[in-house]
């Protein structure tokens, strides 16, 4: 997912904003915000996965006699 987000951001930054209407500029700004949020959510997901893996390891060690 991160690659898709990065590639899309590259495309968005390649848009010449001077040629856009006000409505298009607003939509572009909203797209930037949505992708920034998606990146933050992906980072949170990665951290939660790491915590999950750590807790699973602790649980497995605790279950062994």
Image (cartoon, helix red, strand yellow):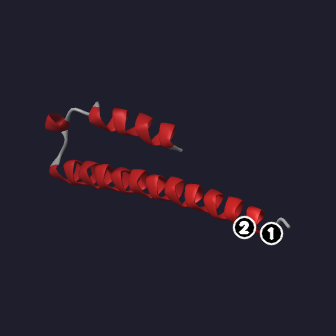
Quick one: SS at disc 1? helix
Kindly indicate the quadrant of the structure image that contains residue 60: bottom right
Of 56 and 58, the residue lying toward us: 58
Of 60 and 25, the residue lying toward us: 60
Question: Going 33% across and 51% down the picture, which residue do you hit?
Answer: 31
Percent of width and height locating residue 43: 45, 52
Q: Is disc 2 surrounded by few (<14), some (14 to 19) or many (20+) residues within 10 Å?
A: few
Of 44 and 17, the residue lying toward us: 44
Is residue 59 positioned above or below 25 on the image? below
Percent of width and height locating residue 59: 72, 67
Q: Quadrant of the C terminus?
A: bottom right
- Image-based side of 28 in relation to 63, left or right: left
- Image-based side of 56 in relation to 35, left or right: right
Q: Which mark is residue 59?
A: 2
Q: Is disc 1 surrounded by few (<14), some (14 to 19) or many (20+) residues within 10 Å?
A: few
Question: Going 24% across and 48% down the picture, which residue do you hit?
Answer: 24
Percent of width and height locating residue 17: 18, 38
Whether the residues at callouts 1 and 2 have beta carbons within 8 Å, the answer is yes
Quick one: SS at disc 2? helix
Question: Going 27% across and 48% down the picture, which residue do you hit?
Answer: 28
Q: Which residue is mark 1?
A: 63
């Amino acid at each position: 997912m991160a690659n898709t987000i990065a590639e899309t951001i590259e495309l968005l930054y390649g848009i010449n904003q001077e040629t856009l209407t006000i409505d298009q500029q607003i939509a572009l700004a909203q797209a930037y915000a949505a992708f920034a949020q998606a990146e933050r959510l992906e980072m949170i997901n990665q951290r939660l996965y790491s915590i999950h893996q750590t807790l699973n390891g602790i649980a497995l060690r605790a279950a062994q006699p």
